[in-house]
Image (cartoon, rainbow, N blue to C red):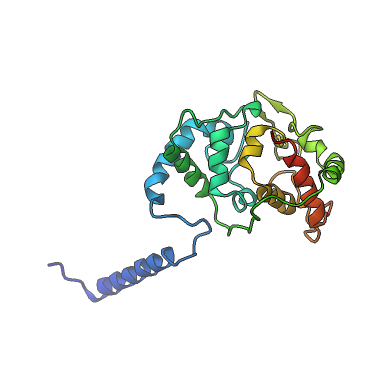
């Protein structure tokens, strides 16, 4: 049996205390911004490998973006549910160069990639409404034409792109994503679109439009609902 001198024993005790404290912090319920289920650790390494194989070329090794939009932004991760990310992987954005992967990957593999992407989240998730919004598509069209077409295109086809993906804009952000393509509309809920309009996308040219957020243009919640209803009208 190894004997400890007084100093070694004190250092060991301090070490045990630190480990115990870290263990306690790590397992405090609700301490993590993204709640990991019991299988999370088992799928993380698989998700990392699959992300590097299928996603990193366009979205960046660490989700910083490139030909594809950035995925590691907290303003995206705090409103994008794991389900939304999974649906996006399944349906893709074929018109923008992102193939649907439902035919190539199993559901558990898609879930693993979504878990890996959500692991970049460290801020608490924002509340995102469920169900369809009650909006006026006609008024939404007028608002969209006045505010959104510069980045998202006259028909929601998205901003300028090259090589099938997105190009970096002069604002060090990314071209506006396509909103009228079916891959997006099948993936995004009304709540997700509404939350994006309300809070914006920090790190890109997409500002926050909800009145009181001190955006360049401020809209009422009803006006935001109207824009969402207009975007949803593109869904087939």
Looking at the image, the residue that sits furthest to the bottom is: 6
Quarter of the rendering occupied by the C terminus:
top right
Where is residue 187? Give x, y as percent.
61, 40
Residue at 85% across, 43% down: 138
Quarter of the rendering occupied by the N terminus:
bottom left
From the viewer's side, name the closer residue of 157 and 45.
157
Q: Is residue 101 above or below residue 83?
A: above
- Asked which quadrant contains residue 17, the reply is bottom left
Q: Is residue 221 above or below residue 169?
A: below
Q: Is residue 33 left or right of residue 218?
A: left
Where is residue 209? Give x, y as percent.
78, 52
- Asked which quadrant contains residue 16, the reply is bottom left
Residue at 66% across, 33% down: 182
Residue 69 in view (yes/no): no
Q: Is residue 123 left or right of residue 200?
A: left
Residue 78 in view (yes/no): yes
Where is residue 91? Give x, y as percent.
57, 33
Residue at 40% across, 45% down: 43
Q: Is residue 22 above or below residue 196?
A: below
Looking at the image, the residue that sits furthest to the top is: 163
Count of marks, rendered view: 0
Where is residue 130? Give x, y as percent.
64, 54
Q: Is residue 120 left or right of residue 174?
A: left
Residue at 55% across, 30% down: 100
């Amino acid at each position: 049996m190894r004997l400890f001198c007084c100093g070694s024993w004190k250092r060991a005790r301090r070490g045990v205390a630190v480990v115990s404290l870290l263990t306690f912090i790590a397992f405090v319920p609700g301490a993590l911004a993204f709640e990991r289920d019991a299988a999370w650790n088992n799928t993380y390494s698989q998700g990392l490998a699959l992300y590097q194989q299928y996603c990193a070329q366009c979205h960046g090794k660490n989700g910083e973006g490139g030909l594809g939009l950035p995925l590691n932004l907290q303003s995206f991760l705090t409103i994008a549910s794991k389900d939304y990310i999974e649906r996006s992987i399944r349906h893709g954005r074929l018109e923008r160069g992102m193939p649907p992967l439902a035919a190539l990957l199993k559901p558990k593999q898609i879930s693993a990639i979504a878990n890996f992407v959500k692991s970049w989240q460290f801020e608490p998730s924002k509340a995102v409404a469920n169900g369809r919004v009650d909006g006026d598509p006609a008024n939404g069209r007028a608002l969209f034409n006045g505010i959104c077409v510069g980045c998202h295109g006259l028909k929601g086809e998205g901003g300028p792109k090259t090589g099938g993906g997105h190009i970096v804009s002069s604002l060090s952000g990314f071209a506006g994503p396509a909103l009228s393509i079916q891959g997006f509309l099948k993936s995004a809920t009304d709540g997700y679109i509404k939350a994006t309009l309300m809070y914006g996308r920090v790190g890109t040219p997409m500002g926050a439009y909800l009145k009181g957020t001190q955006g360049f243009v401020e809209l009422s919640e009803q006006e935001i609902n109207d824009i969402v209803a207009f975007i949803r009208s593109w869904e087939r």
